[in-house]
Image: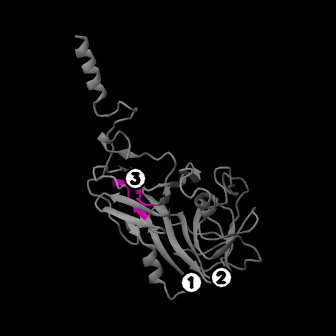
Amino acid sequence: MKVLKIACALALLGLPALAQDRKVTIDWAPKPKALPDYTGVNKPVTRLSEVLARHKSQASWSQDVIETERYSAKWIQMAPGEKTRTQFHSDDRTVWVVWGGQIRFTIHGQAPFVATKGFLVQVPFRVPYSMETVGSEPSLRFEVTRGGAIASYPATREEGGAPPPRDGHHYVKVSYPPTLVAGGMDSYTDKNKPYLDFFKDYVEKYPTGGPRGGLFVGDHDNQAAIIRGQGVPTPPDTNKGHFHIGNEEFWFVLEGRIDYRMEGKGLFTANTGDVVLALPGRFHRASWANGQMDTRLAFNRSPTMLHNYAEDANARQ
């Protein structure tokens, strides 16, 4: 009898993990019968090499990459000496990944600074800023704003008169209170700083390892997370990853390569500078591609957004 009890105990230890090794929640999640289509400029992967080839002969250009209700993201190149008018966005922050040349950022309340390739920069809502390409080369940046967001402009003599109409809107002078509730500027915090030099703060400092990453942007309604690690063998197709309910997610590949498996799109690899978009309801999986250090910058609704894994995945991928 004692031998039988020991055998039973060993058999239990050998059972599949299921939920024995960690507590998970099982529920019924809504998933669309028909997967949402990639339409307009939206693609599963936008290759930087193709974007640059398309604008090879242009000194200044802009190309939309993502246009959804929540996000607007685009590549923008400015010629040497070109600068923007001072502007701001009314109700959400703006994020950039600088990817070429030199850009002088002038942000209200901050000392001006020059950002080069690999700088991550952000501006809170209603904080005025301007950008100028310095040096002899064009500057290249990836810009992320709220979907459909249209900039506002301080009404100052230095900036001149009303901006020209755009996107079916014309500009009128308005006033608003200085309080944050109905006007006024948001501010930087310890968790949301003006900029980060990714190549200096991560790649040079930790060439073969170091921290996995962390939040560059993190508030109740925004997340941009650095996810870094050593490449691993591509997981099997049985690992479907997870999906989000009603929210898209996208990534900018900062370093190395990332393997993606996207429901309905199969397995593909994104290279440095590429942008990958997962639409709501689609199972997707991202993994560091084998052979080098890899990093992706993940944009999604918030740090607390729900991740729905397959029932047998034990809430992991």
Q: Is residue 305 above or below residue 184?
A: above
Question: Which residue is denoted by mark 1 in the rendering?
Answer: 60
**Residue 288 visible in rendering:** yes
Of the residues shown, which amino acid type is indicated by label 1?
Answer: Ser
Question: Which residue is denoted by mark 2 in the rendering?
Answer: 82
Q: Is there CB contact under 8 Å for labels 2 and 1?
A: yes
Residue 40, quarter of picture: bottom left
Question: Which residue is denoted by mark 3 in the rendering?
Answer: 246
Of the residues shown, which amino acid type is indicated by label 3?
Answer: Gly
Quadrant containing the N terminus in the rendered view: top left
The answer to which of marks 3 and 1 sits earlier in the sequence is: 1
Distance from Cα at disc 3 to Cα at disc 1: 35 Å
**Residue 120 visible in rendering:** no
Distance from Cα at disc 2 to Cα at disc 1: 9 Å
Provide residue 283's location: percent of width, then percent of height.
Answer: 33, 53
Instruction: Tell whether 50 sits left or right of 194.
Output: left
The answer to which of marks 2 and 3 sits earlier in the sequence is: 2
**Residue, x 70% and y 60% (percent of image)?**
176
Disc nearest the viewer among 3 and 1: 1
